[in-house]
Image (tube, grey):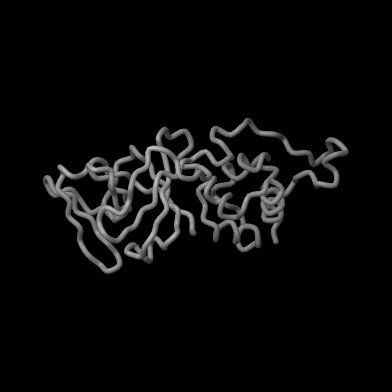
Amino acid sequence: MTLIGQAVSRLRKEKGFSQQQLGSMVGMSQQAIDRLESGRTGHPRKIVQLARVLGVSPDGLERGEILPATQAAAGPSEQSVIPLPAPAFSLGRDLPVLGRAQGGAEGNLVMEEGAIDWTFRPADLAGVRDAFAVYVTGTSMVPKYQDGDLVYVHPSRPPRRDRFVLVETSDHRGLIKQFIKWDEDILVLRQLNPEDTVRLPRARVLRVMLIIGSMDG
């Protein structure tokens, strides 16, 4: 295990985060956090975000210079952490989960006005008003999304071809699909399992919202 891996593992556990939770807050997968902690990855690209969430300086984190728990009560030492400014996003569960989505049949997502659950906010949604998440049910978007996955939605970022989206229809139902294009007044989407093309008239589409990431269920 590397020094940075030891430091990340230790600080993550002290703060009570799982690898998935830490990853979602800094824009890394659970597998990437595991590789970092086990020493299979050296210098992570998200070192600044990791340091901010874990409450240490980036340089100190990379060198593994954290104050051991046994010395924490004794006061500062040469290896004391230099505190960073408070992060610009909450480390608590402040992102609302607004519904359960099913990628299969059309209209299996009901957009709730109030949260049915709360989850951690990933770094890419820090400061984004009206951002939210939904649970996936069903298997029509396997292998991209599995039953029980949590997907994070950016409500205002425009979708691009082949990106995955949450489509809200005019009757406040929706579906998770892969965005292909607008063909004049027809929204063209791709379903993965079974592979199929879905077409919706513009009059039925209220919003097309970009999915910026997910967490395994």
Q: Position of residue 24 (x, y in %)?
A: 52, 49
Q: Residue furthest left?
A: 184
- Image check: 82 left or right of 194? right
Q: Residue furthest bottom?
A: 194
Q: Position of residue 84 (x, y in %)?
A: 65, 33
- Image check: 101 left or right of 95? left
Q: Residue furthest right?
A: 74
Q: Position of residue 52 (x, y in %)?
A: 61, 39
- Image check: 181 left or right of 86? left
Name the residue nearer the viewer: 194 or 26. Answer: 194
- Report how many numbered discs are placed on residues in the image: 0
Q: In which quadrant is the N terminus drawn?
A: bottom right
Name the residue nearer the viewer: 45 or 200. Answer: 200
User: Is residue 20 positioned above or below 79 on the image?
Assistant: below
x 57%, y 52%: residue: 44
Name the residue nearer the viewer: 26 or 217. Answer: 217
User: Is residue 213 positioned above or below 77 on the image?
Assistant: below
Q: Position of residue 131 (x, y in %)?
A: 41, 39
x 50%, y 42%: residue: 121
x 48%, y 37%: residue: 126
